[in-house]
Each structure stands twice: as C-alpha cells, then as structure tokens.
Image (tube, rainbow, N blue to C red):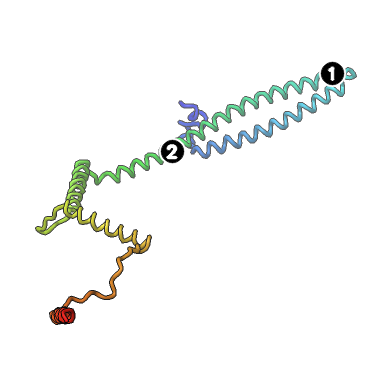
C-alpha cells in the first residue's frame, strides 16, 4: 500500500472507496500545519515561563527550580517533536501539490491530444501529399504562364537592335546639345559686311554711247 493510501485509509471504510481528492488532502495538511504552529507558540511561551521560574527560585528553593527545569525539558522535547512533524507534513503537502499539478497537466495534455487526433481523423497522408503536389504543379504552371505573358510580342515586325540603339543615341545627343544651348545662351557669330548696292551690269545701250563718245573725241582731235 502506498504512503498516500496509508495516510488516507485507502482500502477500508467509506473514504477508502472514493478516496479524498488532492485538494481536500492539501487543505487538511494545511489545517494541521496551522494547528501545530499554534502549539509551537504555546510551548515556546511555556518554556520561557519555566525558565523564568527556575531563575526566580534559584538556590533559595532548589526543589521548585529543579521542577521548573524538568517541565522546561519536557516542553522542549515536545517542541522538537512538533518541528519534526511539521517538516514531514510540509514535505507531504508539497509532494501532493506537485502530484496534483502533474495530474492537471497530464489531463490537459490528454485533452489536447484527443483534440488533435479528432482534427487528424479526416486527414489522409496520401491525400495530403497529393494535394501538396497539385499545389506545386499549379504554382509551376502559373510561373510559366506569367513568363510567357511577360515576353514582348512583335506581331510579325522585326527591328534591328543596333539601328534602334544608334537612333536612340542620336536623339539623346540632340537633347543634350539643346540643353547645353539653353544653359549657355545663343552664340554670336560675326557676319561679313553686306554691300549696300551691287554694281549694275553694263547694258548694250551703255556700250553704244561709249563708242559714240570715243568717235567724237577722235574727230575733235583731228581738227
């Protein structure tokens, strides 16, 4: 028979059939501790009183002093026994409290295990593996579709990449030059002087007049 069984009278009588609950046993042990603590205080006071009486009688009344010391010794012996009993009861109470805690913990763990089992009853590991494989396949398919959609489509038109890059660079250079002109301002370039009037081309009439003048001058010189 276990220590707890002996303590609570398991195996005989009404209490042995049902047995006390851990909470009831813990409460009784606490009540016993409180009772013994009060008895300790009482014995400590009695010991102090007997010691005072022995000092009071001293050598004047040795018989009374010796009787007081004997009672003091008996009280001290009872006090020591109570100290030992309290230590034992404290150990039993702590052990019972730990056992009660462990029982509650195991009970809750068993409850959780049953809940987990119930949650897994409708699950088949093969079906789970199959489902995860389907998910992986669908993800792979989705990535392939996204890659195909993201590729540029020329609709039959093909362009020379080098030619496009050259044109882009030319546009960038034009834009750069324009920005530089806007920053530095228009540059003044000196231009050559433009003549006010252009020489007129001699006409046929003018040539005939010149010939007449030459002929006149020649005639005047011969006179």
In the image, 220 versus 170, the foreground residue is 220
Q: Single out the residue that lies furthest toward the right.
A: 60
Q: Residue at x 85, y 22 (%)?
A: 55
**Residue 185's spot in the image, x, y percent?**
37, 63
Q: Residue at x 15, y 81 (%)?
A: 219
How many labels, in total? 2
Give me the residue at 65% from left, 35% from top.
35
Q: Can residue 206 be seen at all in this image of the molecule?
A: no
| Percent of width and height locating residue 99 | 47, 33
Q: Secondary structure at mark 2?
A: helix
- The vertical placement of 134 against 21, above or below, is below
Residue 99 relative to residue 115: left or right: right
Residue lying farthest front? Answer: 223
Residue 105 marker:
2
Specify whether residue 164 is in view: yes
Estimate how packed mark 1 is, as few (under 14), some (14 to 19) or many (20 or more) residues with alpha carbons within 10 Å. few
> Which mark identifies residue 102?
none
Q: Nearer the viewer, mark 2 or mark 1?
A: 2
3D distance between C-alphas at marks 2 and 1: 63 Å
Residue 45: % across, % down: 76, 30
Q: Which quarter of the rendering shows the C terminus?
A: bottom left
- Name the N-terminal-most of marks 2 and 1: 1
Along the viewing direction, whichever of 219 and 210 lies nearer the viewer: 219
Tag 1 residue: 63
């Amino acid at each position: 028979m276990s220590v707890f069984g002996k303590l609570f009278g398991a195996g005989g009588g009404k209490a042995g059939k049902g047995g006390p609950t851990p909470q009831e046993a813990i409460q009784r042990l606490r009540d016993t501790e409180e009772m013994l603590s009060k008895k300790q205080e009482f014995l400590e006071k009695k010991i102090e009183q007997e010691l005072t009486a022995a000092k009071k009688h001293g050598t004047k009344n040795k018989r009374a002093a010796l009787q007081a010391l004997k009672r003091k010794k008996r009280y001290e012996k009872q006090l020591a026994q109570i100290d030992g009993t309290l230590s034992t009861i404290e150990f039993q109470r702590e052990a019972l409290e730990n056992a009660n805690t462990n029982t509650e913990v195991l009970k809750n763990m068993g409850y959780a295990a049953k809940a987990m089992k119930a949650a897994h009853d409708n699950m088949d590991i093969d079906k789970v593996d199959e489902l995860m494989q389907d998910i992986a396949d669908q993800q792979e398919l989705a990535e392939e579709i996204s890659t195909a959609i993201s590729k540029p489509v020329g609709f039959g038109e093909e362009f020379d990449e080098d030619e496009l890059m050259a044109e882009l660079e030319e546009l960038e250079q034009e834009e750069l030059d324009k920005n530089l002109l806007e920053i530095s301002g228009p540059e003044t370039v000196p231009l050559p002087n433009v003549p006010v009037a252009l020489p007129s081309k001699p006409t046929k009439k003018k040539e005939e007049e010149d010939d007449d003048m030459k002929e006149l001058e020649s005639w005047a010189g011969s006179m």
